[in-house]
Image: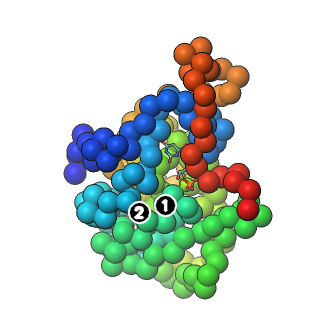
Amino acid sequence: MNHDQVLDEFRAAGALLEGHFILSSGLHSPVFFQKNAVFMDPDRTERLCRALAEKAQAAFGKIDVVVSPAVGAIIPGYETARHLKARAMFVEREGGVFQLRRGFEIKAGERVLMVEDVVTTGLSSRECLDSIRGHAGELVGAACLIDRSGGKADIGAKLVSLASVSAPAYPADKLPPELAALPAIKPGSRGLAA
Ligand SMILES: O=P(O)(O)OC[C@H]1O[C@H](OP(=O)(O)OP(=O)(O)O)[C@H](O)[C@@H]1O
Ligand SMILES: O=C(O)c1cc(=O)[nH]c(=O)[nH]1
Ligand SMILES: [Mg+2]
């Protein structure tokens, strides 16, 4: 699946939103990839994650375990793992820090791939990778559906993406006037009260 086909899947799902969004990192953006509009369609999710699994396998070889950061990456992590014939686990925030819970266990020698839905600054990816590094197993790399940093985010591991896009994102005190004029919404889960 090429770059345009990936973006066409998001467009067809109504997942390419325009407005004023506060991202997980606190940056503000006029565009948002609402991945859940994609993931509610199992066939569309299968097409994208099969392509991501093929790309990850070509880059990293055999993968035994996929670990994804909750909430957004649970579904693509599971579906990508299905195509890789790997086990699927997720980390979730406990006291703000990503942890493997629910009996998830990585065994010594297992080859681990981190799967993220969307990468912006790479902060969530780095936090997820830090958590994985605290366990047994060999971290082989990372994969995401959309890298909206256009390849600029440094996650401290090799990252393959299905589509790389340079999407604008601004600190809160540097908003262009046309963006500042719009009401802001924060779609993600970081910082939500329990
Ligand atoms: O590269 P970053 O700057 O970290 O931004 C990308 C992250 O933001 C979103 O998660 P979010 O924390 O909004 O919650 P969600 O997974 O529940 O959507 C997305 O799922 C990535 O995990
Ligand atoms: O940076 C984010 O929080 C983010 C951006 C985006 O386009 N989609 C998403 O789910 N999260
Ligand atoms: Mg997330």
Q: Is residue 37 left or right of residue 25?
A: left
Instruction: Tell me the quarter of the picture where residue 84 sits.
Output: bottom left
The amino acid on which the numbered mark 2 sits, given as a three-letter code, is Pro
Determine crowd level at label 1: few under 14, some 14-19, many 20+ residues with C-alpha closer than 10 A: many
Of the 4 image quadrants, the one containing the C terminus is bottom right
Q: Is residue 43 left or right of residue 116?
A: left
> Which secondary structure, mark 2?
helix
The amino acid on which the numbered mark 1 sits, given as a three-letter code, is Ala
Q: Is residue 120 left or right of residue 133?
A: left
In the rendered image of this protein, does residue 93 appear above or below residue 5?
below
Res 49 label: none
User: Measured from the top left, where is residue 76 in percent x and y?
Assistant: 41, 63
User: Measured from the top left, where is residue 158 in percent x and y?
Assistant: 46, 54
Q: Say which residue appears at 54% left-offset and 70% top-offset.
A: 90
Determine crowd level at label 2: few under 14, some 14-19, many 20+ residues with C-alpha closer than 10 A: many
Q: Is mark 2 within 8 Å of ligand 1?
A: no
Q: Say which residue appears at 73% left-offset and 67% top-offset.
A: 94
Instruction: Tell me the quarter of the picture where residue 174 sits.
Output: top right
Q: Say which residue appears at 68% left-offset and 27% top-offset.
A: 172
Q: Say which residue appears at 57% left-offset and 46% top-offset.
A: 187
Asked if disc 1 and disc 2 are in contact, CB closer than 8 Å, the reply is: yes
Return the residue nearer the eye: 83 or 43.
43
Q: Is mark 1 within 8 Å of ligand 3?
A: yes
The residue pinned by badge 2 equals 76
Task: Using the rendered image of the protein, determine whether residue 151 is visible from the camera's viewpoint.
Answer: no
Res 73 label: 1
Instruction: Tell me the quarter of the picture where residue 62 sits.
Output: bottom left
User: Measured from the top left, where is residue 33 in percent x and y?
Assistant: 44, 43
Residue at the extreme top of the image, as rendered = 177
- The alpha-carbon separation of the residues under discs 1 and 2 comes to 5 Å
Return the residue nearer the eye: 26 or 121.
26
In the rendered image of this protein, does residue 127 appear above or below residue 63?
above
